[in-house]
Amino acid sequence: MNFLGGYFRALFEREPRLWEEHLDLLSKNFFFKQFIPELTSLSGMSDRSAERIVAMVRGGEVDARHLGALLRRDIAGLSEATIKDAINLTLEKMPTNGAYIALLLLHHHYIIDDQRILPRGITTRVLLDPFFWKNAGIETNKSRVDYDWREIASRLSRENPEIDELLADTILVNFGKEDSIAGLYDSEAYRFLYETIQRKPSAMWARITSYLGPPIDKRAYSLKEWLKGEKGFKTSESSALELIEPADIWAWIDGDVDKRAWYFATFVAPHIEPDDKRSSLARELLIRYGSRAEVRRNFTANYSSEVSWGSLKERFEKKKEHLLEVKKREHNLNIITWIDEYVVMLDQDIEREKIREEHGDFGA
């Protein structure tokens, strides 16, 4: 095959018309037709040669997996009709993983050449294919799949802004599912969701809260951690929650204060300093709902959840000192109450760690 590949490559470079004729002839031979996709990919690519492979797959002369041969050459110059035929055929003939080849065909043809407009219908069909959302092997097969998915989704969204919410909703439905690209560690799908929230914060918040809970299932837990920007779900320097209009958040909580005020306290950014812009949501939460013991209690757990090293006693002492300094500048009674309660807890923690250190017990 290497010899034939070299011969056909030289023929493609010197006599492309003769190259096509040779491939036409071999494609009719019972024995050689099986090698046509590989010979083509080894030597060159044209619209006619691509159509030949597509026709052979459609006719059942070669296996559909050979459509992947198109990806080994530059396909930017192929006609849109040929690319669409190849994509439709991969989805039709390869129900298990055809969407992955289709995604790569879209990426190689449309994304690399940013002058082309993505075909909305077929692109949406590929992006929503179960391969990306219900595939137990997605983790091991990841490679660049979620990156290419996000690039295509972002381009489609720019060209068709109305598609934003459909794609984002698919991510939300599958958020945290290990057999989907929305369950991969640091998935690019989260980045697309973040970008969509930037463009349409109110509309997206309405959708997010449909899946956020309570009740808190695995999806809700993963989603709230991502909104907060923690535990592998971090998308950028700011958390996704910071993109939401505060008025929309308070309206959501006010719709069921008993269930949502304490819940929001578990994933609001745990900052309380009045001169820190990251503190605005947490401070407003305590101002509005901090008279509720369960809100203060859950915010305390949230505030205490950071990871640190070194002496626990010293960490607790520094945190106490910091909060007492904050209290000196604080005027809101709910925030002061929270600080006082937390300082009592810190005193207990400091005393416990002091005893441990005195006994030489440095365990957790």
Image (cartoon, rainbow, N blue to C red):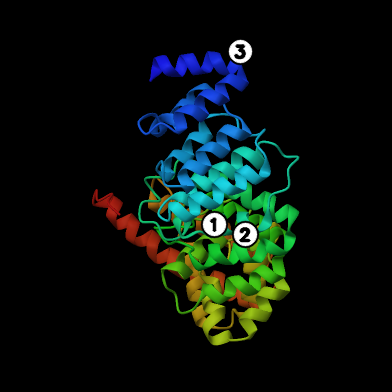
Q: Is residue 237 visible?
A: no
Label 1 or label 3, whichever lies nearer to me, is 3
Residue at (44%, 39%) from the top-left corner?
Answer: 66
Q: Which mark is residue 321?
A: 1
Q: Given the image, on which type of amino acid does mark 2 rest? A: Ala
Mark 2 or 1, nearer chain start: 2
Position above or below: 286 against 188: below
Mark 1 or 3, nearer chain start: 3
Q: Residues within 10 Å of mark 2 (few under 14, many from 20)?
A: many
Position above or below: 314 against 18: below
Instruction: Compare residues 298 and 40 and report the one nearer the observer.
Output: 40
Query: Tag 1, which secondary structure?
Result: helix
Q: Position of residue 190 (x, y in %)?
A: 56, 55
Q: Quadrant of the C terminus?
A: bottom left
Q: CA distance from mark 2 to mark 1?
A: 30 Å
Q: Quadrant of the N terminus?
A: top left
Q: Which mark is residue 14?
A: 3
Instruction: Compare residues 27 and 51 and report the one nearer the observer.
Output: 27
Residue at (51%, 81%) from the top-left corner?
Answer: 293
Would you say 61 lies left or right of 149 here?
left
Q: Given the image, on which type of amino acid does mark 1 rest? A: Glu
Residue under numbered circle 2: 240
Would you say 45 lies left or right of 185 here?
right
